[in-house]
Image (cartoon, rainbow, N blue to C red):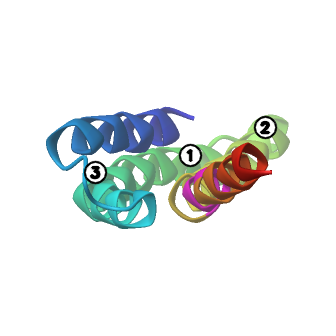
Amino acid sequence: LNDTIVVFDRIRENTRRRGKETLASLINTSINQTLSRTLLTSGTTLLVVLALFFLGGEIIHDFSFALLVGIAIGTYSSIFIASVFLVFWETRSKRAKKA
């Protein structure tokens, strides 16, 4: 969730700076600018959760596995799904305004 907020905040900043570009171009630029931060944050968190999974004992395995899945899905959705959804939403709202 935090990575998605960072990406969308960067989109907002880039919209102010480069208002004449298309939304898809702004999103692409914003994701490229925040990608290393997103991957490093998720990677370090993933390392801690992996240590918890392997060293934590049987009681904590299910919890740490859920965290592993959540980190993987959250990182993927922050990079690939949320921004595409924004482009889809914007395109659809523009079509609705024309109709």
Return the x and y of residue 77 as percentages of the image width and height: 63, 56
- Judged left or right of residue 16, residue 64 is right
Return the x and y of residue 67 as percentages of the image width and height: 69, 43
> Which residue does the numbered mark 2 point to in the structure image?
63
Tell me where the magenta segment starts and ends, as one range.
81-86
By secondary structure, the bulk of the magenta-drawn segment is best described as helix
> Which residue does the numbered mark 3 point to in the structure image?
37
Which disc number belongs to residue 29?
none
Return the x and y of residue 69 as percentages of the image width and height: 73, 54
Which disc number belongs to residue 49?
1
Q: Amino acid at mark 3?
A: Arg
Res 92 quadrant in image: bottom right
Q: Nearer the viewer, residue 87 or 46?
A: 87
Q: Within the magenta stretch, is there residue 83?
A: yes
- Judged left or right of residue 2, residue 73 is right
Q: Within the magenta stretch, is there residue 23?
A: no
Q: Which is more N-terminal, label 1 or label 2?
A: 1
Q: Which is more N-terminal, label 2 or label 3?
A: 3
* For discs 3 and 1, the disc positioned in front in the rendered view: 3
Q: Quadrant of the N terminus?
A: top right
Res 31 quadrant in image: bottom left
Q: Nearer the viewer, residue 22 or 8?
A: 22
Q: Which is more N-terminal, label 1 or label 3?
A: 3
Q: Amino acid at mark 2?
A: Phe
Mark 3 and mark 1: Cα distance apart in space: 18 Å
Mark 2 and mark 1: Cα distance apart in space: 10 Å
